[in-house]
Image: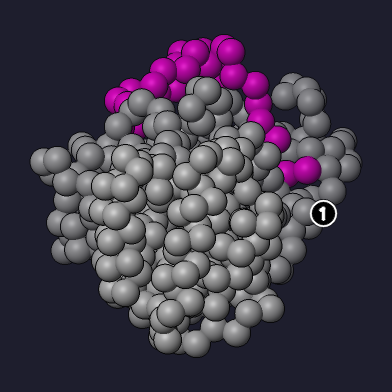
Amino acid sequence: MAMVPRFRFAPSPTGTPHIGNLHTALFSWALSRHTGGDFILRIEDTDPERNTPAAAQAMMEALTWLGIDWDEGPDVGGEFGPYVQSARLARHQEIAAQLLAANLAYYGDDPTQQTSQLTNQPLRLRLPRSGETIVHDALRGPIRFDNVLLKDPVLVRSNGRPLYHLAAMVDDHDMGITHVVRGEEWIASAPIHVQLYRALGWQEPVWIHLPLILNKRGQKLSKRDPEGGYLISDFQEAGYLPEALFNYLLLLGWSPDGEQEMVDKWIVRQQFRLERLSTSPAVFDWDKLNWVNRQYLQRLSDERLAGLIRPFLEDAYDDLPMSEAWLVALTAVIRPDIAKLEDAIDLTEWAFVDDFAYTANARAALATPPAHPVILRLISELAALVILDQPTAESILRQMRADLQAAKGWRAPDIFHPIRAALTGHVAGRPLPEIMGIIGKERALQRLARAIRGG
């Protein structure tokens, strides 16, 4: 019977989840789903000074939000538990003792010294002094290391705590992990891990080292990058949809079939083959992410999108009660311009704030010769109305344009720029009838009067 492929993601719970970590998790998960394998979540909490239970919980919540599920882990259990590394200490110590007994490891810094004479010293793995170690990477092919250049690595600290090299490899072996997917920063440590497997007589997993993700300046993503925040909380707070971020992250280092760019879990299961992964660094492109997110937002109904932007608007403009119908109508007006949910705050300022500042272009439009007569004409038109809605606004503006063009020779911008400046503080934006339908007669009249008075 063929062995079921087993992949894992093994984060350290030391802070807020970062997009680089989640990208690695996503690719490991995607390969497991394409191959019909299992995906295991293991928490590597071997650094007690930096680990927090809250960080482990945050990582699990981030994975769930992004749409990544696991078959075994700390919360769901499984037959290879425990899935928290600190709970496996006795097993790590057992393997360390086994290596020491076989003279494959030694205490201290001198491999020739009698280890029984040493106390409170780190335990090191004895690496070969000649030849080469070959790491067979499934993406990159064989990676060769000259053994004479390798230093014997510490496996257990002098305080008895095992380091990553030992703990992770023992856990991978014990959990039956067949494929280790991790970032290329681990390539330098890979010969240690290969030699550890060999020393213990274990079958190596398939090694897959993913290329880095870089910013547009060619630098590795950092938590405080000037191009943007790369913590998962940054994406959530900006209002990216999880399915859009899931889709975009998959495109950083993987090519779906054909020209396809919109991908979901079904396509991952069908197409996420190892041979379609890139070995070149991917560049995180915010414009492309915004484009992908916009595609997902545009699939939503006005009602659904209104529900998603409501918390952002309530945070920004908490002093104006919003009826559901009014918010849905407002959402329909601004939706073509939304790339992420937080954009709604700036895009709707005109709908919530009456004493907005005028831009320089708006002030210039209000200072033109046609501005005064145009605004006065619109005030008289609106004053005669009972209700101002979008079709009525459209009819009034069309008639004004025809009349003023015939009588004064004024062009559309001469007429509409001062009106837009008075109503929104800008000279560009959504169509004026839509804006007037949202703010209604009374507020429109107040804003027009304010512009006449000079703001």
Residue 292 as seen in the image, left or right of residue 54: left
Q: Which residues are magenta?
A: 128-157
> Residue at horizontal 78%, vertical 23%?
110
Residue 173 as seen in the image, left or right of residue 401: right
Question: Residue 37, position in %: x, y?
Answer: 27, 61
Q: Could you say which is closer to the camera, residue 397 or residue 431?
A: 397
Q: Is residue 397 above or below residue 21?
A: below
Query: Which residue occupies the extreme left position in the image?
Result: 258
Residue 6 as seen in the image, left or right of residue 1: right
> Residue at horizontal 64%, vertical 34%?
226
In this rendering, does residue 18 appear at all? no
Give the image quarter of residue 12: bottom right
User: Looking at the figure, which quarter contains the C terminus?
Assistant: bottom right
Q: Is residue 213 above or below residue 94?
A: above
> Residue at horizontal 27%, vertical 60%?
398
List the residue tagged with mark 1: 49
